[in-house]
Amino acid sequence: MLHAAKTCIQRDYLLVRFMWRTGVRVSEVINVTPNDIEFKNNVVNIRKAKGGRQRRVVLDQETLKMLFDYVLALNTPEDQPIFPISRAQVSNLVKRCGNMIGVQIHPHTLRHSFAIHLVQSGMDLRRLQLLLGHSSLRITQVYLQFKDDDLREAMKRFHFEFFFPAIFIKVRANGLKTPGTKNYSHLLTNFLVFDIIEFLTIIFGIILLTPRIN
């Protein structure tokens, strides 16, 4: 994914990389300003977050250095967005990068991949909730479904770079299944306790995580 993004202009590559490394929403990344970034602490303050729930996310040193150089080169004002583009433009950019590697990808896919990787790495749900900015821990619990054998099998199937776990899902009359993997229909029962908007967003992101099976 990032290799595909490298063929884009610097702004677009940095935007995709930022989303991939932090799990932020589209509405959040397009509002990040130089003033929001604590370069010495490797932290980005997400001030215009969903529901007004401001939070802090950690960004790796390499990406921070690239952002610093980019902001410096453009002389971006401290209070102006680093990525002054629309949500639709971000969506088109991510989809274009996905097409380059033959995969259907939505911006929220990057957020899901970020969360699944952290769960697999052993992060506790409370910390993950804070990083993602979820209003409830119940919403974050969905990512417990993607651990251990299920996630490893999906990653072996698609071999994405870094930690992008691809899950091959096809909707069938008897539930959600993938060839050679477990039945995922039990996910629906657990999801019913979540807010309907968050539920639909997560399901939509998971379905777009990989191309459909014909």
Image (cartoon, rainbow, N blue to C red):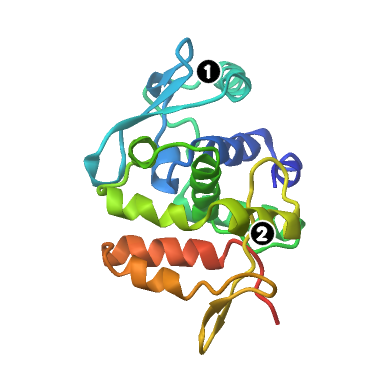
Q: Report the quarter where the C terminus lies.
A: bottom right
**Please, is residue 14 above or below residue 77 in the view?**
below
Q: Which residue is mark 1?
A: 75
Say which of marks 1 and 2 sits in front: 2
Q: How many marks?
A: 2
Identified at 66% across, 69% down, the residue is: 211
Q: Amino acid at mark 2?
A: Ala
Identified at 66% across, 59% down, the residue is: 154
- Front residue (pair 62, 67): 62
Residue 153 spot, x, y in % from top left: 68, 58
Q: Which residue is mark 2?
A: 154
Identified at 64% across, 58% down, the residue is: 166
Residue 70 occupies quadrant: top right
Label drawn at residue 12: none
Residue 204 spot, x, y in % from top left: 47, 66
Name the residue at the top extreme: 40
**Please, is residue 154 above or below residue 36 in the view?**
below
SS at mark 2 in the image: helix
Looking at the image, residue 135 sits to the left or right of residue 116; the answer is: left
